[in-house]
Image (cartoon, rainbow, N blue to C red):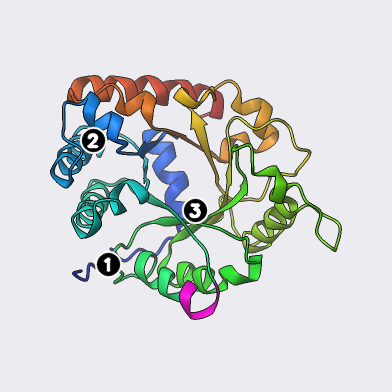
Amino acid sequence: MRERERPMSSQPFGTRLRAAMNERGPLCVGIDPHSHLLDQWGLPDTAEGLATFTYGVVDALADRVAVFKPQSAFFERFGSAGIYVLEQATSKLREAGALVIIDAKRGDIGSTMAGYAAAYLAEKGPLACDALTVSPYLGFGSLQPAIDEAREAGAGLFVLALTSNPEGPQFQSARTVDGPTVAGAVLDGLRELNADADDLGSFGAVVGATIRSTGEDLDIRGPLLAPGLGAQGGTAEGLKDVFGSAVRNVVPSSSREILGAGPDAASLRDAADRANDAFRAVLGY
């Protein structure tokens, strides 16, 4: 896999994210090339179909949407050919001024976590992106190699905290030996990492848009990636109920509601614009 250098930036991820959302709106488009979406676009479920689908989304939306979130699994399933498409898409999106969050949910300890960080977060990493989703369930301290790499590269992290899958509360609502829930301890750790941020920190949480009120303090001074909007039932107006006073820091992610409008580029743009307008109204952009 070839080496691709991340464009150098003097600004941390959180600062760049706020500026991008101010300019283009808060919408994050999830690029999730499910087999049924490829079929809906009239494409084969192959690496070639994946490339046509992905580059079609990129060409239609890269210059008008602030944030994109490609789901790594749907590229990995095609092996090296799929990873190449992910590399190329990430590069094209960033060249167009968009920010890219690779949704890979990596999590491990020591040198293994450092390896993931080198791949996705280092300036010369082969999959260098603006931010990476990570899992804290080997302990928040296990994220330290990724935290260190993100700080050095001006990148960000989104840490799983309150996910909307029904199995999530088994771990996330469990109490730690010190008293707070596991999710609460994750949010506390992120709040500490963002303590010195002037506005929006670079270390965010993943909080499902369809969760009910949990009583957790979501004001972590960092971004809150909110999947589950659109086809999964979450609504723009409902974000106020979930996120309360922290709603302006939400990065609302929608996938099927946008991608299902393709392959026509004008239809994709119209779907993205309508979603973005709805989120602008709620989040105050």
Q: Position of residue 28 (x, y in %)?
A: 41, 37
Q: Earlier in the sequence, mark 1 or mark 3?
A: 3
Seen from the viewer's position, the closer of residues 280 and 261 is 261
Task: Tell me, yes or no, if residue 168 can be seen here.
Answer: yes
| C-alpha separation, residue under disc 1 versus residue under disc 2 | 22 Å
Find out whether the residues at labels 3 and 2 contact each other: C-beta distance under 8 Å: no
Residues rendered magenta in the picture: 109-113
- Mark 3 neighbour density, 10 Å: few (under 14) some (14–19) many (20 or more): many
**Nearer the N terminus, badge 3 or badge 2?**
3
Please tell me which residue is depicted at 60% across the width and 28% down the height of the picture.
239
Label 1 vs label 3, nearer the camera: 1
Q: Three-letter amino acid code at disc 1?
A: Pro
Q: Is residue 112 above or below residue 64?
A: below
Residue found 21% across the figure and 60% down from its top: 80
Amino acid carrying label 3: it is Gly
Q: Is residue 26 within the magenta segment?
A: no
Q: Could you say where residue 215 lies in the image, as x and y percent from the top left?
A: 79, 38
Q: Is residue 72 left or right of residue 204?
A: left
